[in-house]
Amino acid sequence: MKALILAGGLGTRLQPVLRDRPKPMAPVKGKPFLDCQIDQLRAYGLSDIVLYVGHLAYYIWNYFGNGRARLLGFEEKVESGPGWIKSGIYVLEPTILDFMPTSAVVSVEKEIFLQILERNLHLFGYPVQGFFVDIGTPRGYYRFCRHIEKQAQ
């Protein structure tokens, strides 16, 4: 299995807080949020992690350029309605990456997943219980930082 993290959105709602860095590089306890996500995936046994990047990608390239992840491209996150939440993290069979171009901007949800379904392959959602917060707003970002601080105590 491979894990895919969508890390290329513009993060416009969080820009008043982050200013010149992409949302995945928002500092949380001294390291980027994206690094926290990768650590959590590795704790669950996923070591082959693909980052789908774009906006201000050089920040991510500079930080993760040590071979920690394979970097491809990006697409901006779309707001979800009530119900299931897209977290931007997907666990996929490695062959799914064959659908993704390495030099073009595509939407994973709108283009790649559609190609998979058109080929009669399967996609599944998995309900996860527990804490979730969208760090895409200043309020959500600060809430997540407080949550991490409490866990560390």
Image: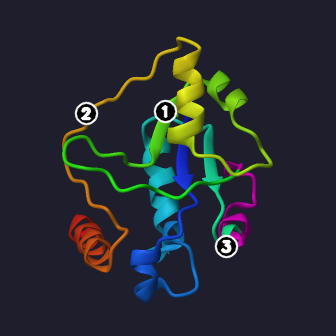
Tag 2–tag 3 contact (CB < 8 Å): no
Residue 29 at least partly seen: no
Q: Amino acid at mark 1?
A: Val
Taking depth in this image into account, of 91 and 136 the one nearest to the observer is: 136
Q: Amino acid at mark 3?
A: Tyr
- The disc, 3 or 1, on the residue closer to the chain's N-terminal end is 3
Relative horizontal placement of residue 133, taking residue 60 as reference (left or right): left
Q: How is the image coloured?
A: rainbow
In the picture as drawn, the residue positioned furthest to the top comes out as 120
Residue 20 is one of the magenta-drawn residues: no
Residue 37: x and y, percent? 45, 54
For residue 42, which numbered disc appears in the image?
Answer: none
Label 2: how many Cα within 10 Å (few below 14, some 14–19, many 20+): few
Relative horizontal placement of residue 70, taking residue 87 as reference (left or right): right
Give the magenta part as a residue range. 58-72
The residue located at (80%, 49%) in the rendering is 103
